[in-house]
Image: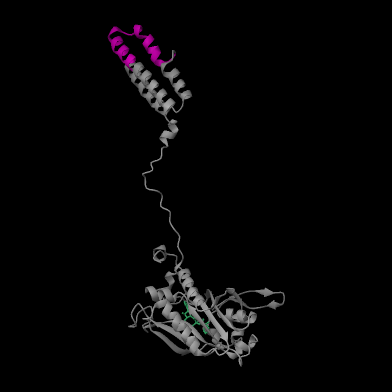
Amino acid sequence: MVLNQIEELASRAFDELGKVTNSRELEAWRVHYLGRKSNLTQILRSLATLPLGERCGVGARANEVKEAFEASLAEKKKSLEQGLPLSLQRESLDVTLPGQQVLLGRLHPTTQILDEICDIFSGMGFQVVEGPEAEWEYYNFEALNMPVDHPARDMFATLWIDFETEAGDRPMLLRTHTSPVQIRVMEKSHPPIRVIAPGRVYRYEATDATHEWMFYQVEGLAVDKNITLADLKGTLFEFARRLFGGGRKVRFRCDYFPFVEPGVEVAIDCLVCGGAGCRLCGNSGWIEILGAGMVHPEVLRRVDIDPEVYSGFAFGMGVERIPMLRYGIDDIRLFYSNDLRFLRQF
Ligand code: FA5
C-alpha cells in the first residue's frame, strides 16, 4: 500500500518537475515534494509505525525516491541558471525544416498579350489611349455611321444600360467594340493622329469556342494626309510578322463595317490544324483576328476633319484570339473561367 503511494508520488513529482520553467516554480516544487510537511517526509517519519515485514522495503524505496528528487532538483536548478529559459528551449527553431511556400502571382495571359501588342504598335509610332467601357450610344453607333434603326447595329448584340439624365433619356450601353474611342480621339485632336486603344468590350452573345460575351479589343487609328489602304496593309502585315514571326499566312478579304470604306477582314492561318480545319477555326483553316478599313468620309466630317484633305485607316482586333493562335488554345472560355491550371501555364 505505502509502496504504491510512493510510486504514485514519484511519478507525479517528476511529471511536474518537467513543467517547471523558473526558480519560483522550482522552489514551490521543492517545498511540496521535499519539505517538512511533504508526503515523502511524512512517510519516512512514520516508518517506525509500520509492520516489521513492510518497514524495510518501504524505507529503502522512500530513501531512493528522496535521493532521486534531490538529484533532479539540483539538475533542474543548474539548467535554469545556466541555459536559456526553458520556454525558449522548447520553442527552439529548426532552421533545417523546409520553409513555407510563397505563391507568386503572375500576369493574366490577356494582360501579357496586351502589353506585347502595345509594345509593337508603340514601336511603330502609335500612342496608347483609353476610353470608357460604359459608353453613350452616340459614340458606339451614331457617330460611327450607324443611326437608330441602321441594320448594321444587329452585328453588335448590345447590353443596354438604363440611364436617365435631367434632360431625359440618353441611351447608354456597355461598348460593343473599341471603335467609339476613334471618335473621342478625333474630337479632341487634329491630324496627324496615330493611336491604339486597348480595352474590354461586351456583347449580348451566346458563347462558344471562339466567342465570349466579354472580351478585349485593340483599336487602331491613323489619320493624316495621303494615308491609303496600302498603309493599312503594311502596318498589319508588319504587326503579324512581329507577333507571330515570318512563317504565318495573313488573309485580307473584303468586309462591311458602316464606319469604313472599303472595309476588310484579316485572318491568320490556324495554328492548331495548320489550315486543315478544326474546332478552333470552325473547319475553315483560318481565324479572323480583326476588322479594318479606311475611315469613312462621313465619320471624318462629323468630327470636323475634312475628308478632302485627310484620310485614315482604322482596325479593331480581338485580343484573346492571338494567344489562341500562338499557343493552340482551342476554347476562348478558358481565359475567364479562372482555372489556375490553365492560367499558370503562361
Ligand atoms: C468590330 O468590332 C469593329 N469595331 C472592328 C473594326 C474597327 C472594323 C475599325 C473596322 C475599323 P468585329 O465585330 O468583327 O468588328 O470584331 C473585331 C474582332 O473582335 C473580330 O475579328 C474577332 O477577333 C473579335 N471578336 C468579335 N466578336 C468576338 C467575341 N464574341 N468573342 C471574342 N472575340 C470576338
Query: Farthest left residue?
Result: 53
Foreground of the two, 174 or 1: 174
Quadrant of the image occupied by residue 266: bottom left
Q: Is residue 204 visible to the viewer in this orientation of the structure?
A: no
> At 41% across and 35% down in the image, what residue appears?
90
Residue 18 x, y percent position in the rendering: 39, 28
**Quadrant in which the N terminus is drawn:** top left
Which is the main secondary structure of the residues drawn in magenta? helix
- Up-down: is 45 above or below 277? above
Between 334 and 239, the one nearer to me in the picture: 239
Of 3 and 281, which appears nearest the observer? 281
Q: Which residues are magenta?
A: 37-64
Looking at the image, which residue is at 29% across and 13% down? 57
The answer to which quarter of the image holds residue 20 is top left
Looking at the rendering, in which quadrant would you find the C terminus? bottom left
Q: Residue at x 38, y 26 (%)?
A: 15
Residue 47: percent from the left, percent from the top?
A: 35, 9
Residue 29 in view (yes/no): yes
Name the spot of residue 34 as percent of width and height, x first: 41, 16
- Disc count in the image? 0
